[in-house]
Amino acid sequence: MTPGVGYTDDMAALLWALHAVWSNVTPEIEKKAKARLREWFGEVREEELKLF
């Protein structure tokens, strides 16, 4: 049980960081990211980029 408990603070910090990044992605940033994906990988289908 003790080894698992040691990772809970790490998981909390990771979830907080993901939430902070996720909540600050504006439509403009998303548009720039999609343009960069097209530049690097060619045409990408929109449905492949949906997270939910």
Image: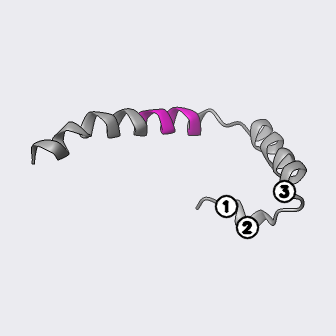
- Tag 3 residue: 41
Q: Majority secondary structure of the magenta segment?
A: helix
Write down the region rendered in magenta: 16-22
Q: Residue furthest toward the left?
A: 1
Residue 21 position, x and y percent, is: 57, 34
For discs 2 and 3, the disc positioned in front in the rendered view: 3
Q: Label 3 sits on what residue type?
A: Phe
Residue 13 position, x and y percent, is: 37, 32
Q: Label 1 sits on what residue type?
A: Lys
Q: Label 2 sits on what residue type?
A: Glu
- Tag 1 residue: 50
Is 49 contained in the magenta span? Answer: no
| Mark 2 and mark 1: Cα distance apart in space | 5 Å
Which residue appears at 73% of the width and 67% of the height?
Answer: 47
| Mark 1 and mark 3: Cα distance apart in space | 17 Å
Residue 7: quarter of image: top left
Image position of 51 (left or right of 32) = left
Dots 2, 1 in contact, CB < 8 A = yes
Which residue appears at 20% of the width and 37% of the height?
Answer: 6
Residue 45 position, x and y percent, is: 81, 66
Dots 1, 3 in contact, CB < 8 A = no
Q: Could you say which disc has been placed on residue 2 in the image?
A: none
Residue 14 position, x and y percent, is: 41, 37
- In the rendered structure, which disc, 1 or 3, sits on the residue that comes first in sequence? 3
Q: How many marks?
A: 3
Image position of 49 (left or right of 24) = right
Q: Could you say which disc has been placed on residue 47 in the image?
A: 2
